[in-house]
Image (cartoon, rainbow, N blue to C red):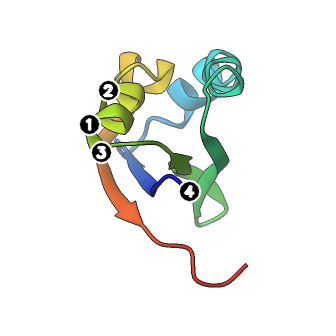
Amino acid sequence: MMPLFAVICRDHPGKLQTRLDTRENHLAFLKEQPGLQMAGPLIENGEMRGSLLVVEADELTQVKEWAARDPYKAADLFASVEVIEWKKVIG
């Protein structure tokens, strides 16, 4: 079994419209990615303000390269992107 990685993205403040405008391209990109286990927005005060993805891959560098191609990243939506190895314990 390959390692799992969490991709934790935080949006720039006030960029909800950028997220909404880019969402269709982002979702199409995600559907093409091998190893994606789950994905969804982070919610603050009822509003989408980030993303959490869990990706199965051989190496951390693969996931960082993959995350760098996300249309949200290209649209300058993210203030930060963290990629870290994650271990599933329950679920």
Tell me which residue sits at (40%, 48%) in the image. Answer: 9
Q: From the image, tell me which residue sits under label 1.
A: 61
Q: From the image, tell me which residue sits under label 2.
A: 65
Q: Secondary structure at mark 3?
A: helix
Q: Secondary structure at mark 1?
A: helix
Q: Amino acid at mark 1?
A: Thr
Q: Amino acid at mark 3?
A: Leu
Q: Is residue 24 left or right of residue 66?
A: right
Circle 2 or circle 3, nearest the eye: 3
User: x, y percentage for residue 48?
Assistant: 60, 50
- Decide: marks 4, 1 in contact (CB < 8 A)? no
Image quadrant in which the C terminus is located: bottom right
Q: Quadrant of residue 90?
A: bottom right
In the rendered image, the residue lying farthest to the bottom is: 90
Q: Residues within 10 Å of mark 2 (few under 14, many from 20)?
A: few
Q: From the image, tell me which residue sits under label 3.
A: 60
- Sequence-first tag of 2 and 3: 3
Q: Residues within 10 Å of mark 1 (few under 14, many from 20)?
A: few
- Sequence-first tag of 2 and 4: 4
Tell me which residue sits at (62%, 19%) in the image. Answer: 29
* Cα distance between the residues tagged 2 and 3: 9 Å
Q: Which mark is residue 1?
A: 4
- Decide: marks 2, 1 in contact (CB < 8 A)? yes
- Sequence-first tag of 4 and 3: 4
- Decide: marks 2, 4 in contact (CB < 8 A)? no
Position above or below: 14 against 43:
above
* Cα distance between the residues tagged 2 and 1: 6 Å
